[in-house]
Every structure is written in structure tokens, then in C-alpha cells.
């Protein structure tokens, strides 16, 4: 179902007024995690003003340490719903277990599968039965074939609205948080008709590297970007070091917009 051979035309995933794929470029922006009503609504308004087409925010966070902030849980989803009401932006949030399918179906617009769950096949099967589009991140050390097979799990359940997201992979380099695999964009486009977006924030791990990686992704043909933006990065509960301020995000959107036009996308 995901294979380009049997489906030559690009898939376009539509979420409200936002479209991703087939010449439609979309930017998803927002904090790593939802922290408060004030934070999420302020960031939502700022990224909307800069031209983002969707709002991201984690309510359930997959943290390396069990003692790190785990996210607000269900109340975080309610704050995202408030931010959607305040801005009209569709909301994207990560699901970590099958038991949350019902609440995600009710509250969110796009269901994110994080890198760590790319091969959580039981979760993929459940999400495959949902009516909401899925943002499927590439696993930390997974091949293109494995990634596309995970999309296939979701599509086999009847949910064909899958957006693939390259977010950097594990390599021997430790300077960056991950190594952005730019080759994934043309390679996946050759193999599949699904839209491919890039997360330069988790690839870089440093806010100042987000813009150059974002530009490289657009130049390589990405259908969109997902970028972490926080109104107070120094005090963020998660991933502050890689988060852009609303001002830096606005600058990035100006540059990205020019390049998106040059690539013949809207
Ligand atoms: C995230 O988007 O905040 C996240 C946890 O990303 P990843 O699954 O790519 O690490
Ligand atoms: Mn994050």
C-alpha cells in the first residue's frame, strides 16, 4: 500500500485547511511538551502568525529517564484543544500506548508515533484503525525498508493517511544529538508515494543548527517540517536547548518560504 510502484501519484494528507504532500508544503510547530495553558496558547498564536499550518505539543513524553518530566498526560491534550480553539490550528500529539487510542481519536487531529515506537507493532495496528492521519517518525536506528513497513502496518488497518518524518538517526557522531539523514527524502520519495517531512530540531539538538538543517531538507524535496518552538526555551521542561524562540522561528519561516517557492511548492 505504501509502495510507489502500485500507487504512482503522491499522496496528499489533508488536515483541516492544511495539506502536506504532492506540492503542498506544511510546517508543524510548537513546544516539545505542553506545560501550561499560557505557554501553549502563547506559542500557538505566535507560530500561527508566522505561518505554521499545525501546532505540535507532547502530552505523553517518551523520556530516557523515568525521573524526567513525563508530560502532563490527558490534561495536556485538553490544553492543546484550547490552543486549537484559540487559533484554528490543527493539533499534533504523540500517542504512546494502545489504551489512549480513544482519547486521541476524540481530541487530536494528527496522531504522532515517536521514533521509539516506530516498531511497536501492536500500537501501529491500533492506530491503523483510527480515522486521524498519522505522523510516523523514523526509528533511531531503522532502515528505510523497516520504516516503510511500519507505515504499511498502519495502512493495512485501513488508515492510509500517513506522513513520514525523518528526525535524525544514531551514528558514531556525538556532537549533534542525531545525524540528519538528508538522503532519506529522495530515497523515500523514490520508494513511496507518502509525504516526507523533516524534524531538524531532534536531529540537531541545538537551536542554532535548526535553520540550516531545515533549509537542507526543503532543498532536498521535503514536503514539510516539524519544529520545536518555545516561548521561554531556557525554562522549558523538555528540549529547551533545541527550541527556537517565536522570533527565531519567524525568521526561519521567512527564509523557508522563499526556498519553498523556488522548489515550486505552496
Ligand atoms: C518529539 O517529537 O518530541 C519526540 C519525542 O521526537 P522523537 O520521537 O523523534 O524523538
Ligand atoms: Mn522534543
Image (tube, rainbow, N blue to C red):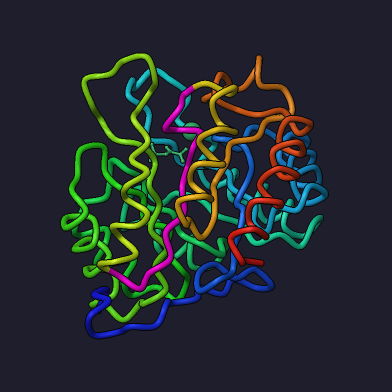
- Seen in the picture, residue 252 relative to 25 is either above or below; the reply is above
- Seen in the picture, residue 77 relative to 14 is either above or below; the reply is above
192 and 220: which one is in front? 220
Q: Residue furthest front?
A: 262
Counting from the top left corner in percent of width and height, residue 83 is at 73, 51
For the N terminus, the quadrant is bottom left
Counting from the top left corner in percent of width and height, residue 107 is at 57, 62
Q: Is residue 203 inside the magenta stretch?
A: yes
Residue 4 image-quadrant placement: bottom left
- Seen in the picture, residue 213 relative to 64 is either above or below; the reply is below
- Seen in the picture, residue 168 relative to 187 is either above or below; the reply is above
For the C terminus, the quadrant is bottom right
* Residue occupying image coordinates x 37% and y 36%: 180
Q: Is residue 24 left or right of residue 220?
A: right
Counting from the top left corner in percent of width and height, residue 46 is at 80, 42
- For the image, the number of numbered tags is 0
Q: Is residue 70 left or right of residue 144?
A: right
* Residue occupying image coordinates x 39% and y 41%: 167
Residue 60 image-quadrant placement: top left
Specify start and end residues of the magenta stretch as a single range: 192-205
Q: Is residue 184 left or right of residue 237?
A: left
185 and 196: which one is in front? 185
Q: Is residue 210 inside the magenta stretch?
A: no
Counting from the top left corner in percent of width and height, residue 185 is at 37, 54
* Residue occupying image coordinates x 28% and y 40%: 116
Ligand 1 is found in which quarter of the picture?
top left
Amino acid at each position: 500500500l505504501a509502495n510507489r510502484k502500485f500507487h504512482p501519484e503522491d499522496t496528499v494528507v489533508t488536515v483541516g485547511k492544511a495539506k502536506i504532500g504532492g506540492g503542498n508544503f506544511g510546517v508543524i510547530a510548537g513546544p516539545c511538551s505542553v506545560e501550561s495553558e499560557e505557554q501553549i496558547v502563547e506559542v500557538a498564536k505566535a507560530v500561527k502568525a508566522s505561518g505554521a499550518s499545525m501546532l505540535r505539543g507532547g502530552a505523553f513524553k517518551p523520556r530516557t529517564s523515568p525521573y524526567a518530566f513525563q508530560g502532563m498526560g490527558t490534561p495536556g491534550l485538553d490544553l492543546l484543544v484550547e490552543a486549537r480553539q484559540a487559533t484554528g490550528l490543527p493539533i499534533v500529539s504523540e500517542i504512546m500506548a494502545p489504551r489512549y487510542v480513544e482519547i486521541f481519536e476524540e481530541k487530536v487531529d494528527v496522531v504522532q508515533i515517536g521514533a521509539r515506537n516506530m516498531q511497536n507493532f501492536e500500537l501501529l495496528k491500533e492506530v491503523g484503525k483510527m480515522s486521524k492521519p498519522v505522523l510516523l517518525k523514523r526509528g533511531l536506528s531503522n532502515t528505510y525498508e523497516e520504516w516503510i513497513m511500519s507505515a504499511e502496518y498502519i495502512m493495512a488497518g485501513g488508515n492510509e493517511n500517513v506522513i513520514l518524518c525523518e528526525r535524525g538517526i544514531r551514528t558514531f557522531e556525538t556532537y549533534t544529538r542525531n545525524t540528519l539523514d538528508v538522503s532519506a527524502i529522495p530515497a523515500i520519495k523514490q520508494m513511496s508515494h507518502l509525504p516526507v517531512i523533516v524534524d531538524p530540531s531532534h536531529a540537531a539538538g541545538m537551536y542554532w543548527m535548526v535553520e540550516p538543517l531545515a533549509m537542507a531538507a526543503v532543498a532536498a524535496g521535503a514536503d514539510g517540517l516539524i519544529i520545536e518552538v518555545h516561548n521561554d526555551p531556557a525554562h522549558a521542561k523538555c528540549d529547551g536547548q533545541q527550541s527556537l524562540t517565536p522570533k527565531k522561528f519567524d525568521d526561519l519561516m521567512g527564509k523557508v518560504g522563499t526556498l519553498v517557492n523556488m522548489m515550486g511548492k505552496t
